[in-house]
Amino acid sequence: MPNVLPDSLLTLHYRLAAPGGAAWVDTFGHRPATLTLGAQQLAPALEHCLIGLEEGAQAHFELPPDVAFGMHDPQRVQRVPRGLLQQYVPDSVRLAVGDTVQLAGLSSASGASAAATVTAADDHMVELDFNHPLAGKPVVFDVHILGVL
């Protein structure tokens, strides 16, 4: 059976969660994911866990926060005037605590649109956390490799 290599095309089921918490992503019981390693579709630490696994393998990984998605960085939390956000979010969208927002007008160095979680909001200001939602948390990563090309 083929092994996962750094540039493999994979079909797999995976679950990503904080220990004892609800899954952040879970394809088990749904359509499996298909992705190419090295294409930034998974975090590098998660890709590293997959290297060397055989087709058909099932594995469980527990990653500390600094390895998984890094530590929570308070400098990545910004308070923004609600009116300023209207450039990036339609007027009909009322941002509420817990919402995740894709801000297409803002982009990272890779060109991907910026994503943020609303952590506080009132009529005038919105607090946006640009950290990954699992930053600062240990992560459980369960996988079942269905196919390797």
Image (cartoon, rainbow, N blue to C red):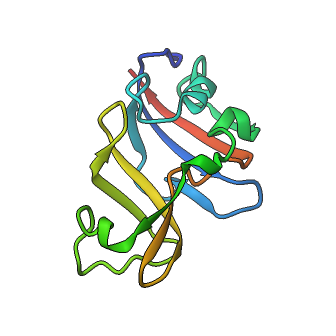
Residue 105 in percent (x, y) is at 25, 51
Quarter in which the C terminus is drawn: top left
Residue 124 in percent (x, y) is at 42, 79
Give me the residue at 36% from left, 31% from top.
109
Image position of 27 (left or right of 66): left
Which residue is at the front of the view, 103 or 33? 103
Choose top left, top right, bottom left or bottom right for residue 64.
top right
Q: Above or below — where is 142 with respect to 121?
A: above
For the image shown, how many numbered marks are present on the structure? 0
Q: Above or below — where is 95 with respect to 114?
A: below
Give me the residue at 58% from left, 19% from top.
51
Residue 112 in percent (x, y) is at 32, 40
Give me the residue at 60% from left, 40% from top.
143
Name, please, the residue furthest toward the bottom. Answer: 123
Give me the residue at 41% from left, 53% from top.
115
Choose top left, top right, bottom left or bottom right for residue 148.
top left
Which residue is at the front of the view, 79 or 105? 79
Residue 74 in percent (x, y) is at 64, 50
Which residue is at the front of the view, 50 or 40? 40
Image position of 24 (left or right of 141): left
Choose top left, top right, bottom left or bottom right for residue 85.
bottom left
Which residue is at the front of the view, 135 or 46? 135
Image position of 83 (left or right of 140): left
